[in-house]
Amino acid sequence: MKVSLEREGKNVVKVGVEVESTRAMKAYEVACRQVSHRLNIPGFRRGKAPRNIVERAVGVDYLKREALENLVPEILGRVIMDEKLDVITEPQVDSWEFNPGEPLKLNASFEVRPEVNAGQYRGVSVQVPEAKLPEDALERAMKNVAEARATLQTVEPKPIETGDTVLLDFECFVDGNLVEGGKAEGLVLEIKEGNFLDGFCEQLVGAEPGQSREVQAKFPENYRNRDLANKEAKFKVDVKEIRTRVLPELNEEFAKSLGQESLEKLKEALYGRLEQEVKGENEARTQKLVVDAVVAGANVEIPESMIERESNLLLSHLKHFVQERGQSWEEYVNAPEYPNIYKEKKEEATQRVLTSLVLGAIVRAEGLSVTEEESAPFLAELLNRYNVPIERIRQDEQVRRAAEQLSRQAMEEALTRKVVDFLVAQAKIDYVPEEEESESKPEAASEEAPKAKKGKKAAKEQQSGEEIGSQANESESKSEETANS
């Protein structure tokens, strides 16, 4: 087999292959036998028809393509191994000449991984804005726990005030016609500015139970029902009740209702969870800053084709998300905000490809690898996330293939975690107060990052409280089911 290689651009390799006539002819004859087993030719048992009959039945060109489908992967796989090519795409056959009895000539092309100079990736120095629990973190988290278990109770009739929760019925009219699906009964709504539709709640302030109000409001431009987007609407609202949120008293009984021995044990459990979340937040910040520093010190020319593929992948995820919300993708793309969204996705794709190339180069340089045991937790998480039932993997071929793909993804995620942990262990890390980090980097992006992280921390405190409340609800529900059975 004769092989010629030619590099084109940053990372494209063109391959010319000439295969001996005897090997090519053998592949052609194998294809004939395979095809004859699938044909029902009068006068011949399956698989017993001679070659000329099979050629007459399906055509020589069809048999050539069948032979190439069997032969080409084997040929190009051997070329890739012999030439030690780091291929990142499936080979694409550009042209071929194949006449039975003559050498097979084949031209193909594929992309190889671009060269990466990872630079000095060991011992990078980073300053990490350290997340810390504020003094009132436990107090706020306990409040969130109580909020998660709050109940709504009807109060004596009075004029509606901002902050009240009301029970109401309404009908929505656009251009004088009742909107399809625009009727609701027993809607529970908190009266606050901007809730439901802009200006809707404000017009209900002062109304009392038993009264009706006519409310004017406008649907937003990006409303999911495009027939109603940016249209004026008239609502006929009947106020039924005013309700108030009643928080449970934080005492021993409340703690026991959440499965804790005492109020003190509840506080300990909650504080321990908050500490773990802050620790996880600091680890995530450290990993990101270390990887960013390593990537910034590397040198690599990224092929546009790699960025384009990653960008298309991100956009396909976005399209799926948009359509799941009931929006039209065509209308979304034609919206005035889309060019900026597209630009952001392109920038994100560039950074993702760059990071992947640099981390991959370090993996190879350090000889890092993972075992199935190390990837098992990642695989279990993926199987759970995509709802792939383990018991069906052996029974269903399609499920098995999906599980194999997830298994490869799990290995990649485990390897990424290993190389990031390796870089963090080598790095010089200096934890600094968030405010100090913000002042030392006046750029807009640097100023906004600590603020966003503080917001995440507050959200986690609320989430911890809601999770405890949710667990209690599940426990209570299971108890009720047991009692009923």
Image: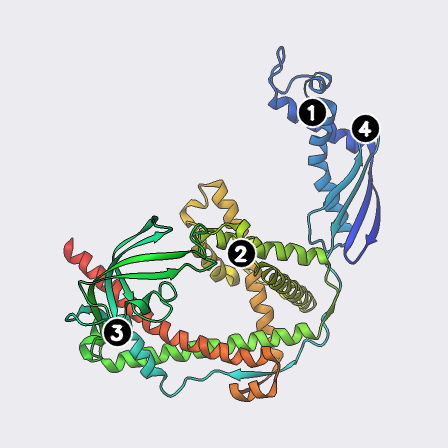
Q: Of the numbered discs in the image, which one, if any, rests on residue 161?
A: 3
Mark before the other along the chain sequence, 3 or 1: 1
> Closest to the observer: 98 or 153?
153
Mark before the other along the chain sequence, 3 or 4: 4
Mark before the other along the chain sequence, 4 or 2: 4
Quarter of the view holding residue 191: bottom left
> Closest to the observer: 201 or 143?
201
Q: Which residue is mark 4?
A: 99
- For the N terminus, the image quarter is top right
For marks 2 and 3, give the CA distance. Answer: 40 Å
Task: Name the spot of residue 274 as percent of width and height, x first.
Answer: 38, 78
* Numbered disc 1: secondary structure: helix
Which amino acid lies under the numbered mark 1 shown in the image of this protein?
Answer: Cys
Q: Of the numbered discs in the image, which one, if any, rests on residue 32?
A: 1
Which amino acid lies under the numbered mark 4 shown in the image of this protein?
Answer: Asn
Task: Name the spot of residue 173 as percent of width and height, x first.
Answer: 34, 52
For marks 3 and 4, give the CA distance. Answer: 87 Å
Is residue 309 placed above or below 194 in the rendered structure? above
Q: Is residue 373 left or right of residue 477?
A: right
Q: Of the numbered discs in the image, which one, if any, rests on residue 247?
A: none
For marks 4 and 2, give the CA distance. Answer: 47 Å
Mark before the other along the chain sequence, 2 or 1: 1
> Closest to the observer: 271 or 24?
271
> Closest to the observer: 63 or 47?
63
Tag 2 and tag 3, C-beta contact below 8 Å:
no
Task: Name the spot of residue 179 as percent of width and height, x first.
Answer: 35, 49
For marks 4 and 1, give the CA distance. Answer: 14 Å
Q: Nearer the viewer, mark 4 or mark 1?
A: 4
Mark before the other along the chain sequence, 2 or 3: 3
Is residue 315 placed above or below 369 in the rendered structure? above
Q: Nearer the viewer, mark 2 or mark 3?
A: 3
Which amino acid lies under the numbered mark 3 shown in the image of this protein?
Answer: Glu
